[in-house]
Image: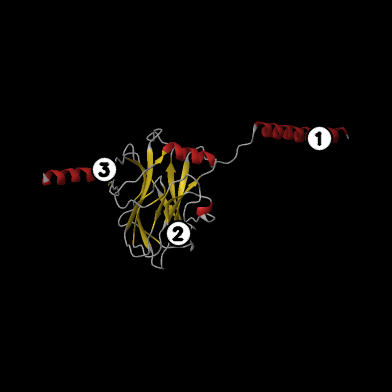
Amino acid sequence: MKKLILAATALLALAAPASADVILGGQLWTTGGASTLSLTPTVPGGNQPLNQPCIICGANQPQQLANFGYTNFQNNGGTDSIAFFSTAVIGGGNPGADTVGIGYDGSFLRQYLLSQNDPAFNFTIGFDVNDTGTPQTLESFWFLNLTQHTVLAAFSPEPGGVLVPSQNNGTGFPDYTLSGFSLDRGDIAPGDQIIFFARITGANDGPDSFFLQATPTAAVPELSTWAMMIVGFLGVGGLAMRRRATFRVA
């Protein structure tokens, strides 16, 4: 039996990308079709708890948006390695490593993004780092479909993750942006449960937090606005033609 398990593990490793962490919560996760997330030192503006949903949230910056679940966890700097899931429970505790919590309903996330003028259902994650001057390591960040056991998107650099030194001190002020998330995917059915999962090592200060940020679409002028613009352009064109005609007569 032991040889069989080892053989199955080897086959799984061959089938999955080198950076894939396909077993979470004791379940097999399908990685095919997963998007690759990018991490940039782009600092989103403003204090995030005041205007963005905090999905994985330290106890010192509770969620401000009503009805949006968040993980409310503690870390006094004494826990070097941390693994945590988001949760749809408001103020829910961190369920812990490899213990899948309660996911967000995909329809709920879609409605939120629509309310933020994001009909394309694209979003980013703001990452607030708290350290004592010694950089931590973001080992991985996962966007998962709990219902279908699929990895929707992943940030999992090899080897050993990436250092993320704090660059924007203050609770609720993100230091980095994770990009590449989308709900406009064929592998998210109505009612599917969606969850976020992060792993950090070298934690040495208060809890780090992650904020969901919509990507608003530029406003499109209404039909009445278009009509006024066209009339304006025609008027300017007509005036120019009259001036040319007057110049010729003179």
Secondary structure beneath label 1: helix
Mark found first going from the N terminus, 2 or 3: 3
The residue at the point 47 percent across, 51 percent down is 63
Q: Are marks 1 and 3 in contact (CB under 8 Å)?
A: no
Q: Is residue 175 above or below residue 24?
A: below
Q: Which mark is residue 244?
A: 1
| Residue 209 % position (x, y) | 43, 55
The residue singled out by tag 2 in the image is: 60
The residue at the point 42 percent across, 38 percent down is 106
User: Split into 4 quadrants, where in the image is the C terminus?
Assistant: top right
User: Mark 2, mark 3: which one is toward the viewer?
Assistant: 2
| Residue 199 % position (x, y) | 34, 54
Q: Which mark is residue 27?
A: 3
Label 2 – label 1 distance at C-alpha: 70 Å
Name the amino acid, label 2.
Answer: Asn
Q: Are marks 2 and 1 in contact (CB under 8 Å)?
A: no
Name the amino acid, label 3.
Answer: Gln
User: Mark 1, mark 3: which one is toward the viewer?
Assistant: 3
Name the amino acid, label 1.
Answer: Arg
| Residue 154 % position (x, y) | 36, 47
The structure's colour scheme is secondary structure
User: Split into 4 quadrants, where in the image is the N terminus?
Assistant: top left
Q: Is residue 56 above or below residue 192?
A: below
The residue at the point 53 percent across, 50 percent down is 51
The residue at the point 35 percent across, 59 percent down is 137
Q: Nearer the viewer, residue 156 or 57?
A: 57
Secondary structure beneath label 3: strand
Q: Are marks 2 and 3 in contact (CB under 8 Å)?
A: no
Mark found first going from the N terminus, 2 or 1: 2
| Residue 113 % position (x, y) | 50, 41
Q: Residue furthest bottom?
A: 133
